[in-house]
Image: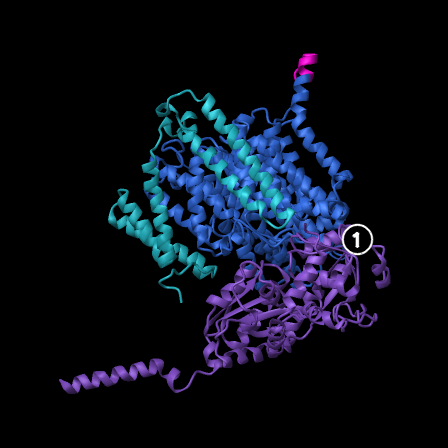
Chain colours: A purple, B blue, C cyan
Amino acid sequence: MAKRMATVGIFMIFLSLMAGGHEVWGAQSPEEFFHGKTIIWIFSGDAGSPGDLISRNIAPFLEKETGAKVRVENKKTDEGVNFTYNKGSKEGLTLCTKTSDAIIGNDILKAPGVQYEADKFNYVSDVYPAIKVFQASPKLPYKTLEALRKAKGLRAGATSAKGSLALSSAVTFEILGLDGKVITGFKGKKDLTLALARGEVDFMVTSDNAAKRDEADGYIINRFTMGNKRSIAVPQVPSIAELGVKIPKDLSPVHKFITSGGTAVIMPPGVPPERVEYLRKVFMKLSDNKDLQKSLEKLTGDDRPFVPGKELQEEMSEMKSDAGLAAKLDAIFKKYTAVR
Amino acid sequence: MVEAFVSGFTNYIDPLRFGFLLLGVFVGIFIGIVPALGGIVAMSLLLPMVFGMERIAALSMLVAIHAISGTGDAITSILMGIPGSGPATVILLDGFPMTRKGEPGRALGMMMCADTMGALLGVGLAFVMIPIVRPLVMSFGNSELFLLILMGLSFLAVLSKDSPVKGLMAGFVGIFLSLVGYQHSTGVDRFAFGNDFLLEGFDIIPVVLGLFAGTEMLQLAVFNETIVPLGVVKVGKDLRRQFFVGVKDVFQHKWLWFRSCVLGYVMGLVPGIGSEVSVWVSYGQAKQTSRTPELFGTGCPEGIIAPESTMNAKEGASLVTTLCLGLPSGISMAILLGALMMLDVIPGPSILTKDLELTMTLIWGLAIANVIGAVLCFFIVGYMNLTWLMTLPPRILVPNILTIVFIGSYTYNNQVPALLVTILFSGVGLLMKQWGYSRAALILGLILGKSFEGYFWLALQTSGPLFFLTPVSLGIIAVIIGLYTFKPILSLLQNRYGKPPLMVGGDEEV
Amino acid sequence: MKAQMIIPLFLALAMTWAIKVAWGYPYQQAKLSVIFVAGMVVLLALVQLAREVRFSRAPRSHQPTAEAAHGEHGGHEASAAQYGGEASWMGGFALAIYLFGFTVAMPIFIAAYMKTHGTKWAPSLITGVLMAAFCYGIFTWFFEMNLYPGVFFAK
């Protein structure tokens, strides 16, 4: 009897060690972990939007690289990011896509409903690093920066108050010394594009993902990029640095804020670092995948490489740690908003 | 242009392309009939498959899903009183009462005929409209959109003619509910008090499911009634006969059908006007111009023909705008746009020169899908004998329908509090129905309220206080005034000159 | 107080409160629409209240609902208790979904409802299981949608 009990006991201990043993004696490698699992990839926005299409394009390639099944889901704007932060898989089976300037902007400006801290996410990659472009209405008579500076009552279009478009426009007014207001309330970027084409607003400052196509269709005119570099999408458009614009030192943080931006892929806080690193490597590998780039080029118009997650992580931490950034952005927005 | 028009049709002689179109129709009907699903779900799931497919086959499948899922929505709306989308709510107002009177086949026949003929007319209208779509879209700015929505809201008065005060109250409550949440233009939290769920505002689907489906299920349970009284509709033969009566109804109201199609088409060309706005405007103008407006809401044919014609014509127009301008008018068109780009088709003005044949092919695809959908619907209704569903006792029907309703409510945005909204509005709907308040008016206010406010401030800020002085705006104002004054003027003329009035309304006489 | 007066009275009070809250919003753009719309509701509610008070002559017990007046449900009316009973099933179902998720709550709700309303055990259970299987198959397996797993079963 005792012998039998001992045998059963040893067998039970053996089983439990097998079941949990790999956790105790040595973790699975990330490759082994992801193989056969299901990754939920949340897009924080509507189906069919550029970020959603990019995620859906990358998903099958990610499946091939990792051996995991990838399922893309849509959640409403901030809800996706909140979900990822609070309820996302700590094992690393949740990804989320959202524009990086919206992630950090909503956090530091304390937008209602935000339940996360932007710098605590694990940033895997920026799959579409964007350059901000000043897009003018074809009906706007001012063709040069000097002419714009002399104009009165310019109207910039934006969607949400203190959203990326609104802040970019407000900071542009401040940096370039333009006179005018930011009109918020447009439903989306496509509505703004139409409004520009009609001449209802004079300009918007937005990422360059549709810059080439919208200009070819006659809706907008790309005047200049807001940073130090030209855009790969519209390489003929000069940067403000080339036009001789010097950014004052006190405006440098806000300028950096509006010019850093892309489509960030994030994981929740608390994911084992080796798994984060593994996916970062996978995404950089995908960045060099010719088939994927070809597919993305059809969607976006160009094949810009992904930005490494570590670089994006550092950028986000830097912006979050700047204590005065939020106040400066707030003050500039209040100065130029048309809302009364 | 003529060549593209003809080859657009002949492209479907190819068995592969026709096969994928047919697949899209089947998927669309299935998805539309299950209230919790929508065309967007199927389209986003199938999107990755599109890469590498023959492009006409791939695009036709997506277009068919989009076209027919709305039809499937309308089927459940009519037969079971479960609206799966905002536009399907309008169909329910007269479609479900017609079913309860024992004429589900007639309602479905009207719906399919109006749909199919609307889609076929859309092909012809595309031929005319494509050259002018861009200038037309460019002439509808924030001011014009605001006035179009104002026209829609003006129908609050029409919807509630029985009791104007109660109806207007319901409508304004609907508008108030639309204002709850985060106001994006100012960043102000209005009546959400920081609650995540309320910050996004009240979604239309959980409200509609509660107000209509939930209320109906409660009443069926309490009064122990079936959807259709037992013995009223026998079997398939009755339904098939009813189906053709419904088809005949459309021909008897051909001017209403034509007017509604044109209205839907024009509104569909302009991005920014959702399906909900156009079908409500259509319903309102049908009631306003009808000889028997008091019958609306009780199973009136005009109440089905007008919104259904508008809805389908609008889809054709949205497709034209998406293809020719590269501007999607909604989420499903955005997905289609993505598919186009993945298949090396660049939508936009250049498509008229480089890919006009493809444009016409997809427009024909929409029409052919509707024809196939109508035939399929006829066989489903007439030969599968679905009347047993409508004569199930409430102890079986109610829990199963409520299950579908709750799934629909939850899956709309994957939020559990949506279930509470549905339950709350089931109670609200019950009270409204009992005490004579118009649920349709509340929904109309909820759908249009936010856009009404948004476009008003945009129009004011972009164009100043005299924003309504553009030619198109003045034209819309004239239409609004005309809609409400033509009947009194006609009566005045009749009294003065003693002649029978010329009816420019829902009937066939002109 | 007549039952018909409750709705306009409730709305008048609620919208008055809403106007008070909206008055404190920082921007005209945020407050004006709310004040206008809520104000209209208050006005209309007061008009309706006045009509209920002034024109309603029938004693309370004989005032039919709008539905009964239109001949719906054979002219019969139901009591609040009857509606409350059925509504509590809806509430209970929602609670079960919240706690146990759709997959568990669906068959239990359907079977329990059918049994308590007069169906035998076997058909009640079979219907519940079949419906749950259908929903699971379509939504979760085929369309890969996430049906809420419930508080107890959430990971």
How far from the left and from the top, in percent, is residue A251?
Answer: 72, 69
- Quadrant in which the N terminus of chain A appears: bottom left
Quick check: A105 left or right of B216? right
What secondary structure is marked by label 1? loop
Corner quadrant of residue C153: bottom left
Other residues around mark 1 within 10 Å, as few (<14) / some (14–19) / many (≥20): few
How far from the left and from the top, in percent, is residue A38?
Answer: 47, 70
Residue at screen point 64% across, 40% down = B149
Q: Which residue is mark 1?
A: A153
Quick check: A312 left or right of C112? right
Residue B257 in view of the camera: yes
Seen from the viewer's position, the closer of residues B457 and A281 is B457
Residue at screen point 70% across, 61% down = A332
Quick check: A202 left or right of B184? right
Residue at screen point 45% across, 38% down = B429
Seen from the viewer's position, the closer of residues A277 and B11 is A277
**The residue under label 1 is which amino acid type?**
Gly
The vertical placement of A145 against B162, above or below, is below
How far from the left and from the top, in percent, is residue A214?
Answer: 74, 59
Q: What residue range appears in magenta?
A: B493-502
The vertical placement of A84 against A314, above or below, is above
